[in-house]
Image (tube, rainbow, N blue to C red):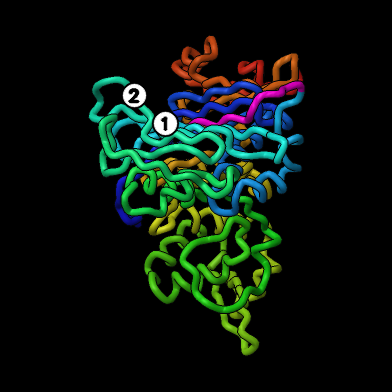
Amino acid sequence: MAQLSHPIPRIESLTVKNYRALRDVTISNITPLTVLLGPNGSGKSTVFDVFAFLSECFTDGLRRALDRRGRLKELRSRNSEGPIRIEIKYRERPQSPVITYALEIGETDRGPQITHEQLRWRRGGHGKPFNFLDYSSGIGRVIKGESPGETGEREEYPLTDPTFLAVNTLGQLAANPRVKALREFIVGWHLSYLSAQDTRGNPEAGPQEHLSKTGDNLANVIQYLHEQHREHLEFIFEQLRRRVPRLERFDARPLDDGRLLLLVKDAPFADPILARYASDGTLKLLSYLIQLHDLNPPPLIGIEEPENFLHPKLLSGLAEECQTASEHTQLLVTTHSPYFVDGLSPEQVRVVSRNESGYTLVQQASDINGIREFIEEGATLGQLWMEGHFKAGDPLQ
């Protein structure tokens, strides 16, 4: 079943400086499905966390995002004194101009603050790139309009607190549609931290359209799909039944006390059982399928180590689901599973490792010597990963 169609913003590159082990990392030519492959401790989760941190800066504010990570001192790379810098290049839709968003976070006598924030583009694809939003420590300007140009109307709009993001503040004003578009893009990201344990709970009854980051509202989403999109829910169950033998369906049943009970029925038995007694893998796979087949998907979905609790033979099918979903959203997946990457192209896989100084390196699999030739001879990325051909990503080398 097809998701709702709409223009899809796409991130094309990410540059990070002074963020934990990401001392100076640039990931270019990011594909609609990008998979970070590497051993434990290589920095995959740190790359993932950059997107989560940026999203939380918009939704919860800089201070809370920093507090969750031990504050700026713990977040800044070791032996580094400079600001944390995050830069993304993206397009709002195919063929539209590349927009660069750069955010720098430093520390002053008054504590952490946004020391620099910029939005830059080359309007119409011609001329020199220029900043249509430029702020330093809460002071700056923005050029108004749908298609801001160097000679456009400038507005000086000081922020009341240097920890506030200018894009987050000005992006709520109709006069700044390009700034607003970026704000909505980042606020809409979904960085998933699915927990099988959280999906077993009994939340308050009430339909909910989208799965939460932990999956604790799984029953609510099933209730919503059952009431509003029953055919789509049956389609998802059919995908699940193909992978979990004898599973018939899940049901969300409201209780008298207002909670919602999630039940699962196996085909051989007449009565369903509580979903809390279903396997972790079944609950996680159902959650992934609901997430990947969202009828109105978020612009970016992040998934951490989907191989946890899943049978290895299910991972190639899950990778195929991710490939399909990437037509409607952008996906970032971390893994160290050879089965998940077997069906991917070398352009979709980034090998993550640490150098001798302890900082993270990220390399596109297609750029590693010999990988293309091995693939042309019939090898798979998973085989090459397990046989040590990526070298930098092998924990035993």
Q: Residue at x 68, y 62 (%)?
A: 198
The image quarter in which residue 369 lies: top right
Q: Quadrant of the C terminus?
A: top right
- In the image, residue 303 above or below residue 255: above
Local secondary structure at mark 1? strand
Marks counted in the figure total 2
- 377 displayed left or right of 277: left
Instruction: Mark 2 or mark 1: name the one nearer the start of the chain.
Output: 1
- Identity, as a three-letter code, of the amino acid under mark 1: Thr
Query: Circle 1: is it few (<14), some (14-19), or many (20+) Cα within 10 Å?
Result: many
Q: Quadrant of the N terminus?
A: bottom left
Give the residue pinned by disc 1.
100
Tags 2 and 1 touching, CB below 8 Å: yes
Task: Judge from the rendering whether residue 344 lies leftward or rightward of residue 361; answer left or right.
Answer: left
Q: Residues within 10 Å of mark 2 (few under 14, many from 20)?
A: some
- Helix, strand or loop status at disc 2: loop
Q: Residue at x 26, y 39 (%)?
A: 147
Which of these two is toward me, 371 or 22?
Answer: 22
Q: Quadrant of residue 356?
A: top right
Give me the C-alpha separation between circle 2 and circle 1: 10 Å
Task: Give the extent of the magenta segment.
Answer: 79-87
Q: Is residue 80 magenta?
A: yes
314, 390: nearer the viewer: 390
Residue 351's mark?
none
Instruction: Please state which of the two labelled residues, at mark 2 or mark 1, is closer to the viewer.
Output: 2
Can you identify the residue that label 2 sits on?
A: 129
Q: Is residue 313 magenta?
A: no
Relative side of 390 to 208, left or right: right
Who's the residue at 62% across and 46% down the image?
A: 62
What residue type is disc 2 on?
Pro
Q: Residue furthest top?
A: 369
